[in-house]
Every structure is written in C-alpha cells, then in structure tokens.
Image: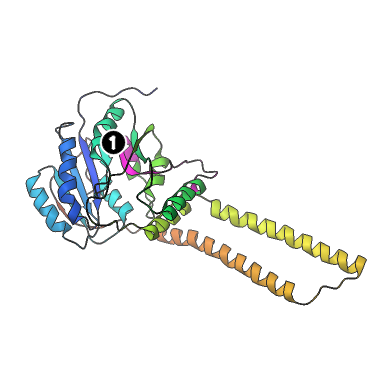
Amino acid sequence: MHAARRQTPPTLTCVVPAYNEAGNLGRVLPEILRVLEPLTRRLELIVVDDGSRDDTPGVMQDLCARHGNLVYLQLSRNFGKEAALTAGLDAAQGEVVVLMDGDGQHPAALLPEMLQRWQDGADVVYAVRRSRDDQSGLHAGLTGLFYRLVNLGNRVQIPAHAGDFRLMDRQVVQALRQLPERNRFMKGLYAWVGFHSTAIDYEPLPRADGRSSFGLRGALSLALTGMLAFSTAPLRAVTLVGLLLSALALGYGAWVIVEYFYWGIAVPGYATIVVGMMFFSGIQLLSIGILSEYVARIFEEVKQRPTYLLRRRQGRGLPAADGESSLL
C-alpha cells in the first residue's frame, strides 16, 4: 500500500516537445491550459522547440504574450525528441510533471484522473494505447516485436505500448535528471528509475494538423537505441550462434572422417568449402557489426557532449523548487 498524498493542489509543470507543430500549438496549448488551470493555480506549460523549421517560434511568441504561464525553450538545432524531453525535465519546477505531445493526440481530458491517481499515492501514472489503428500493420507489428525482444530476460521491464504521455512526481523527475547518458531512450529510463507506477489506457486522438515527422524510419532508429541501451540480447545471440555453428562444424567434420575411413567416400568438389566460407564470413561480419553498434554508443558517451543546447528562453515559469536551482 502506498500512502495517499495531501489533497491540496500541487504546483504543476506540463512539458510539451514540439517539432514543426506551428499548425497545432495554437489549439493544443490553450486546451491543455483550460484543463489544468482548474486543477491548480500554480502551473507552468513548457514548450520545447526542437529546432523547428516552420513558424513555431512566431506562434509561441504570440502565445507567450497571451498566456503568462507559458514558457518557450528554443533549442539551437534539432536534437531529437528524447533530448527535447530532457530539456523540459531540466527546466521543470513543479511538484508534479506531465509529459504530452504537441500534436493533439494525447487527450488532455485524462489529466484530472492522472492527477487523482498521484494524490492516491502513485509516483508515475503512464498512459497505454488501446490500439495502434493510426499506424500501418508493419509499424504496429514491429513495435510489438521490439517490446518482446527488449524485455526478453531483462530485469527492467519496459511497459509495452506506453509512450511519453505520463505524469510523474517530483522525486521521479529528480532521479531522471541524475542519469548522465547521451544516447537516451526515455521509455527505458522511466522504467529503470522505478518508483510506484500505475497505468491508464487511452485512445489516441486524431492529429490536429499536418503529418507526423516520426515515421517508421525514426521508430526503427529509436528502437535500435533502446535495444542497445537496455538489452544485451544481441550480444548473447551472437554467442549462441557461434556456439551452435562450432558444434555443427565439429559434427560435420567428424562425419566426413567417418565417411572417409569406414566407407572410403571422398569429399566431392569444392562447393561445400566455398559455401561454408561465405556463410561463416557473413556470420563474422554480422557479429562485428553488432559489436560496432555497442562500441559506437560507447564512443558517443565518452565524448561527454551536452544532450542539447538552448538558444533562447521566453517566459518566467514557476520559481525554483526548494533546495534546487533551475538547470536552464
């Protein structure tokens, strides 16, 4: 059992990463504020512009002039959604922090129930998609396969079909801010830090405007980062394949010797040798490729470059939490 929290409204931060969402922010942000303002008087809505190439800066300048609790963070270039989320968490000062997308697919109507579950004692309330009807069959199938593979034999189980739409206690945010890695897979980091978590299901809303810039290619790249960051299954698979092929090679060699000495059957031609060399060369190159992906991640980490760079900030937001200073 987890003790319920006080029922007085907490300070609240909502973080919204945005990339080329100029057509959506004018509708999505006022809707989020409309839902959040009755829940607490002390809130900030942080929009992290991840190097947008459309009119997002102009839209945000206008929105910040009309809404005093809006904060606009513009990154120096496109660093990716994981970096934008990290920037938002670094700037967040609320006792409760909510993460939402800027395309309008995360229903703001769920926020009161998520806050109630936090008051009931949950540290993390994460939203799980009921379906993936808005994605292609290939995309949905590969997503399901990824979660099965990344959780295979892993001590840290990443909830399947749970995205970035979630509410977190201040203690969870502080834990996430302590994690130093540059190649960030946020869904895995949420699971790694632990804390008492509860799920809430939802149906994604239709995208308010435009098309998503995060397609199958981006999903595959993020899945590769997640697999390498939270699973050693590829390395173990290479080891098992090596053991299996070694056993088969020894067995085949023994069989050739038996054929030659007991039945006098000579090994016919060079086809077996050529095919065997090509097969084993392919296995070796595949193994080296898998190892090189892990080494490349190590190379990125040891350079210790910052996860993101901030170009400018607009808006005051909440004052720094007790004992803390804002990282931005």
Picture mark count: 1
| Residue occupying image coordinates x 16% and y 47% | 27
In this picture, residue 192 sits left or right of residue 250: left
- In the structure shown, which secondary structural element does the residue marked by tag 1 occupy? helix
Q: Would you place residue 277 above or below residue 240 in this image?
A: below
Viewer-proximal residue among 141 and 72 = 141
* Percent of width and height locating residue 130: 38, 40
Query: Looking at the image, which residue sits at the far left?
Result: 65
Quadrant of the rendered image containing residue 319: top left
Is there any visible trace of residue 37 in the rendered image? yes
Residue interval drawn in magenta: 150-175
Tell whether position 259 is magenta: no
Residue 229 appears in the figure = no
From what the image shows, is residue 210 above or below residue 167? below
Spot occupied by residue 231 in the image (x, y as percentages of width and height): 50, 49
In the picture, measured across the screen, residue 24 lies left or right of residue 114, that is left
Q: Which residue is mark 1?
A: 170
Indicate yes or no whether the magenta region holds residue 155.
Answer: yes
Q: Residues within 10 Å of mark 1 (few under 14, many from 20)?
A: many
Q: Nearer the viewer, residue 24 or 114?
A: 24
Q: Quadrant of the N terminus?
A: top left
Q: Relative to the observer, which residue lies in front, 172 or 31?
A: 31
Residue type, label 1: Arg
Left or right: 220 in relation to 59: right
Task: Look at 15% across and 50% down and name the residue there.
Answer: 26
